[in-house]
Image (spheres, rainbow, N blue to C red):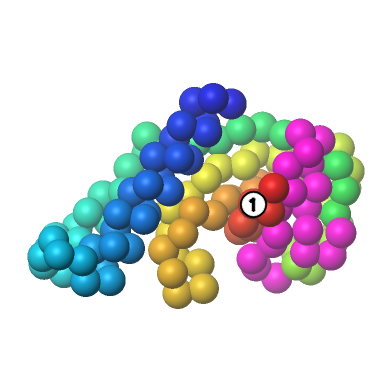
Amino acid sequence: MEVKGAIVGTKRKTLRFLERIAAGSRVAFSQSLLSGLLLLLMSAPAESTCVNDALNRVDKDTLLMNSTAVYRVLDDWRAVVFWLPLSEVTICDQLGNVDDEIAIYYEIRNQDQNQMVRAVRER
């Protein structure tokens, strides 16, 4: 868990740095260099961290896990209506576009239902 926290912290620092660059900070980077950097960050397999967990319950667009983590589904919440408690899930953090902003989101894969949804972590 400490390694995952360090990786997520590093990603957030990188995101803040890139947002400052995009907002017109004093450092002048070309758009092509910024695009290349984003592409590298989004495609690097070492950046993705996955953990296994179990579903505690589904509350509309909210997934509550046995580890006490809470995720809000970004995709259609009806996709998780039939996910059952104690279903095994794999949660992988990703860097990508959420609501027209570059952000960290999670791909939650239900191994029992063979389905995947995108979500953001609430706590």
In the rendered image, the quadrant that contains the N terminus is top right
Q: Residue furthest front?
A: 26
74 to the left or right of 17: right
Amino acid identity at mark 1: Arg
Is there any visible trace of residue 78 in the rendered image?
Answer: yes
- Residue drawn at the location 69% of the way across and 61% of the way down: 73
What residue does disc 1 label? 121
- Give the percent coordinates (x, y) of residue 36: 19, 58
The relative height of residue 55 versus residue 39 in the rendered view (above or below) is: above
Q: Residue furthest top?
A: 2
- Give the percent coordinates (x, y) of residue 102: 41, 63
Q: Is residue 60 magenta?
A: yes
- Residue drawn at the location 20% of the way across and 61% of the way down: 34
36 to the left or right of 38: left
Task: Tell me where the magenta segment starts and ends, as one range.
Answer: 59-76
Looking at the image, how many numbered discs can be counted on the residues? 1
Could you say which quadrant of the image residue 44 lies in? top left
Could you say which quadrant of the image residue 19 lies in? bottom left
Is there any visible trace of residue 43 in the rendered image?
Answer: no
Residue closer to the observer: 107 or 11:
11
- Residue drawn at the location 65% of the way across and 67% of the way down: 75
- Give the percent coordinates (x, y) of residue 24: 21, 71
